[in-house]
Every structure is written in C-alpha cells, then in structure tokens.
Image (cartoon, rainbow, N blue to C red):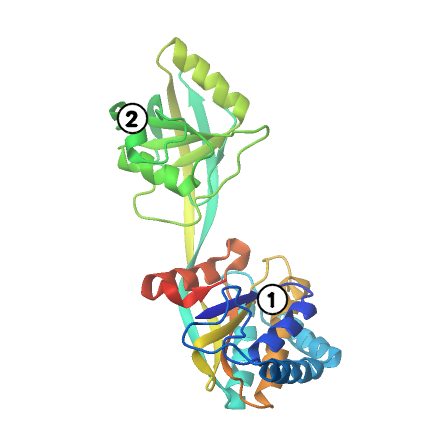
C-alpha cells in the first residue's frame, strides 16, 4: 500500500508530518482506512516510539541546510539554462545533482522513470462562416492542426448537448463539424467521442461567460482539431442552426515538440514494502526563471529530509521520494507515474 503526500511550496510543516509518518510503526503510515488486516494495531508504546523517532528526524531538517539546497538548485539552474522548463538543460543538471547525493548515501535505491513531454506551439488559426465573418475562438491546447487548406463542414450538434460518448452524436456529424457545450466530461473525452463518431473537427462552446481556453491534456491518437468559443458565440451559432444549415471553415497551424525527460525516485532499501510512505515534489519550473519558490522549495525539503533520514536508523515502513518533471505543463510526470501504477497494480495506491 502506498500512502501519498505531496510536498509543495514552503511546505516545511508537511515535511515534518511526512517524517513522523515514515518513521512510524507498521499500520501507522497516515492511512485513514485503519490498520491493515494482516497487521495488529500499534500499541501506545509503539506509536510513541515512532513519533519520537520522527520528531528527531524532523529536528535535523535545518533552515541552514534548506537554504543551502535552494542556493545550489538556483546556481545549477542558472548556470545550465536559466530554468528547469521542458527541454532545458537546467532540469537534468539539477536532477543529476540530487541523484548523485542520494546514491552516495547507499541508503536508497535510486532510479529514473523516463517519459516524453510534448509541447504545443500553436500558430495562426481562423474560424469563419460562409459569409466571411471571422469568429473569435481559441484552439484547445494539444489540438491537432488542420491540413493547409483547412476544414470546411456543416455544424452538427451533439444530441445531449455535451457529446461525451460517440452515441451522443448523430450520424450526420461524419465528415462535418461537431459542436458541443462544455461540461459533463473532459475536453479530451468530448474530442474522442466526436472523433469516433466521424467528425472532422469540433467546436466547444463555453458554459459560462468569457472565453474558453481549454486543453486536451496531451497528444492522443485519434484526436481531431478542436477550438473553443464563448457562450454568447455558441448561442449565436445555435440560433443560426435552428434557422438552417450553418457552414464553417477552420484553419489552424500546430507544431508539437517532443522532449525526453524523467521522474527521479529514491526508495529506502529497508522498510515494509507492503506499507510504503511516499512524498513527491515537482522539480521542473516555468521556462521564465529558475523556479526557486515554485518548486525548488519543495524539492529542497524533500532532498534535505532524505539525506537526514539516510544518516539515521532504517525506517519501519519503506519510504519513496519522488521528484517530478512536467508539472508546469499539467502534472505530466506525476500523472505518468500514477497511470503506470494504475495499469500495473491499482490496489497499491491509497490517498
């Protein structure tokens, strides 16, 4: 069983709570589900012992060490590329430094989980009606581009409004432009359903005031071009559809860059493997800077705690630390790990 904690910005309090949990006795790893059936509930003496050990470890995580770790993260990032954003040299430089320190302790099994970050670079887009009116719109993040000649088709609405399933689209949508209102499911699910129904592209109308700036979350086989419009524009299009056929044309230039990256893990060699305590912090930053607050702080807490733990007694429960990549683009690294775990053994994850 994995008991999950996320260490974010300025999260020293969470870090202290984490070390208290990790040094506890079996069955006392922060679970809200009570003791595991195969293990007896901890006695008062055992709980007190675990709390004492955790408090001692927490006391070792000093402000001086945290500031030193942050300063090193900043130096490595600035010297490499100025940020730890996707495709930067700053991320592997910093992750490599963390990795080397953890390996040197001999206390952890240290390993990487490779994956690929896809970064969209949207170009020009235009949506027009048959009369030449340019419709204000914003392509969804990770939307595929259109052919150079664009896509022209008749608007066809989802029968239930949201179009979350292929069955929610009439057969007439094949080869045409589907239109559905935001809500009911994710943009990715809406897109997938419209694609399965045969739509050439889709338009998502907002269900509230303001523009719609959504994302499909990543590239997927079978996705079709998708753009979003305001609620008022959606109402205007539907009013026109009620009066007769509405034909639109859409062009969109999309370029997707792929960058290899990795999550970094350090797992104690000792401890109950059936009762894992896990803490994670994202190591990447936005491209605009070195990301010392967001989230160098969480990464520094994680590293400093791990190094101090390595100098003490082995934990009763196995402990796994994670430094994630791709968080600033939508929790990509942690989502990749979770999806991998769900595919292999979903019963091992517990919030």
The answer to which image quadrant residue 61 occupies is: bottom right
Q: Between 22 and 208, which is closer to the camera in this rendering?
A: 22
Local secondary structure at mark 1 = loop
Quadrant where the N terminus is found in the figure = bottom left
Disc tally is: 2
Query: Which tag, 2 or 1, sits closer to the chain's start?
Result: 1
Label 2 and label 1: CA atoms lie apart by 46 Å
- Residue 82 numbered tag: none
Residue 173: mark: 2
**Measured from the top left, where is residue 322 in percent x and y?**
51, 71
Q: In the rendered image of this protein, does residue 76 appear above or below residue 290?
A: below
Residue 295: x and y, percent? 62, 64
Q: Residue furthest top?
A: 243
Task: Decide if residue 261 is on the left or right side of residue 314.
Answer: left
Tell me where residue 96 appears, x and y as whole percent.
52, 78
Crowd tier of the residue under label 2, counting other residues whose Cα lies within 10 Å: few below 14, some 14–19, many 20 or above:
many
Q: Tag 2's secondary structure? A: helix
Residue 152 lies, with reference to residue 27, above or below; the image says: above
Tell me, yes or no, if residue 199 can be seen here: no
Neighbor class of circle 1 (other Cα within 10 Å; few <14, some 14-19, many 20+) is many
Q: Is residue 18 above or below residue 200?
A: below
Which residue was labeled with disc 1?
7
């Amino acid at each position: 069983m994995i008991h999950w904690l996320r260490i974010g910005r300025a999260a020293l309090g969470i870090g202290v709570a984490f070390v208290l949990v990790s040094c506890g006795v079996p069955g006392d790893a922060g679970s809200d589900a009570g003791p595991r059936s195969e293990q007896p509930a901890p006695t008062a003496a055992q709980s007190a012992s675990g709390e004492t050990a955790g408090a001692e470890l927490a006391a070792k995580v000093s402000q001086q060490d945290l500031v030193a770790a942050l300063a090193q993260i900043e130096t490595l990032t600035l010297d490499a590329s100025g940020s730890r954003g996707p495709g930067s040299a700053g991320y592997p430089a910093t992750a490599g430094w963390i990795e080397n320190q953890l390996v040197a302790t001999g206390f952890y099994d240290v390993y990487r989980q490779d994956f690929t970050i896809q970064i969209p670079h949207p170009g020009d887009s235009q949506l027009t009606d048959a009369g030449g009116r340019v419709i204000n719109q914003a392509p969804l993040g990770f939307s595929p581009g259109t052919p150079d000649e664009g896509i022209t088709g008749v608007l066809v609405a989802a029968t239930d409004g949201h179009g979350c399933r292929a069955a929610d689209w009439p057969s007439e949508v094949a080869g045409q432009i589907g239109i559905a209102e935001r809500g009911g499911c994710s943009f990715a699910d809406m897109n997938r359903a419209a694609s399965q129904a045969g739509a050439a592209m889709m338009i998502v109308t907002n269900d509230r005031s303001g523009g719609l700036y959504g994302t499909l979350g990543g590239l997927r086989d079978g996705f079709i071009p998708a753009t979003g419009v305001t609620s008022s524009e959606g109402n205007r299009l539907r009013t026109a559809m009620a009066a007769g056929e509405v034909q639109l044309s859409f062009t969109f230039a999309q370029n997707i860059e792929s960058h290899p990256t990795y999550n970094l893990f350090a797992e104690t060699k000792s401890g109950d493997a059936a009762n894992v305590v896990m803490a994670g912090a994202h190591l990447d930053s936005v491209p605009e800077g070195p990301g010392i607050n967001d989230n160098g702080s969480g990464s520094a807490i994680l590293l400093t705690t791990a190094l101090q733990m390595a100098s003490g007694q082995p934990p009763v429960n196995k402990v796994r630390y994670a430094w994630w990549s791709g968080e600033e683009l939508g929790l990509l690294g942690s989502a990749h790990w979770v999806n991998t775990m769900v595919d292999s053994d979903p019963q091992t994850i517990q919030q």
